[in-house]
Image (cartoon, rainbow, N blue to C red):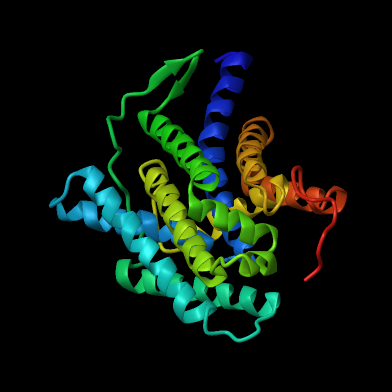
Amino acid sequence: MDLISELTQYLISGLTSGAIYAIIALGFTIIYNATEVINFAQGEFVMLGGMVMIAVDATGRFPLPVSFILAVSSVTLVGVVFQRLAIQPVRRPSAITLIIITVGASIFLRGVAMLVWGKDPLGLRPFSGVSPIAVGGATLTPQSLWVLSVSVVVMAGLQFFYKHTITGKAMRACAFSRRAARLVGISVDRMVLISFALSAAMGAVAGIVVAPITLCGYDVGTMLGLKGFCAAVLGGLGSSPGSILGGFLLGILEALGAGLISSGFKDAIAFLILLVVLFLRPSGLFGPREVKRV
């Protein structure tokens, strides 16, 4: 394989991983805009999406699209229950308190998943075939096409929701100023609940589409969540376009680093990029220049 083919292969791998990171980063951004809190349980929503999809598909009772809907709906319900039971009851919470709650929820969900599904990783059948597709001297699996296409649909759907629906515009208003949103009659508590539901649903979608490529286990959400957080910071917390760009950029840099340097540095690259961004531009590529300390 010549250098051009290798670079093409790394680019394809990077775009596939980047699409997943972008969806996870958008989940962080949705909740951050609504609450100014970083939800460290986001990775567990990704893990639950994959594990529930595997469990439902293993029954053999439902076609793949129905299993997909059931899995996403189940994880969305988990997100709603999490917000109602763990976030909403807290009176006058500080950002640190809410972050600690999300960390605790992450540990709890990971433990429940280990008890339900065990410690062994599980696999999900590909959505459509396994024969690789040749692209410029490189190969592309059909599941990678599913990852990219589903990611594009999710991102486009989220932008449509924000710009062309009353609820989406209300959520944008809350992100701009929660006090002003209350003054014009917007229920901020309801917007926060919807943000957790959306974030959980998007995490579930990411976990489902990536499960056929990488095995899914009770602990996979930790690393995926951290990389999604790195992508959100890289693009700028609170910026949806920044989260998308940050996810794809992180995926491509990670793939190039693993291919051209060493695969052992694959995970370290994400955190190295995070440190560089925090030192040079804490607000990220598309974030505001003023940084709030919490």
Q: Say if residue 214 shows up in the picture.
A: yes
Residue that sits furthest to the front in the current view: 184
Q: Is residue 291 left or right of residue 106?
A: right
Q: Splitting the image into 4 quarters, where does residue 27 fall?
A: bottom right
Tell how many labels: 0
Q: Residue at x 18, y 44 (%)?
A: 63
- Percent x, y of residue 197: 44, 62
Compared across the picture, whether 150 is left or right of 24 comes to left
Q: Is residue 116 left or right of 19 when viewed as pictured?
A: left
Q: Nearer the viewer, residue 174 or 146?
A: 174
Residue displayed at 25% across by 58% down: 55
Q: Is residue 153 above or below residue 8?
A: below
Question: From the image, which quarter does the N terminus lie in?
Answer: top right
Q: Residue, x 27% and y 56% (percent of image)?
A: 70
Front-lying residue, 14 or 3:
14
- Is residue 220 shown to the viewer in this render? no
Q: Residue furthest left?
A: 61
Q: Residue furthest bottom?
A: 91
Question: In the rendered view, does 145 fall on the left or right side of 243?
Answer: left
Q: What is the quadrant of the C terminus in the image?
A: bottom right
The location of residue 220, given as percent across then percent down, is 47, 57
**Closer-to-camera residue (74/117):** 74
| Residue ID at (20%, 53%) | 58
User: From the viewer's perspective, is residue 294 above or below residue 195?
Assistant: below
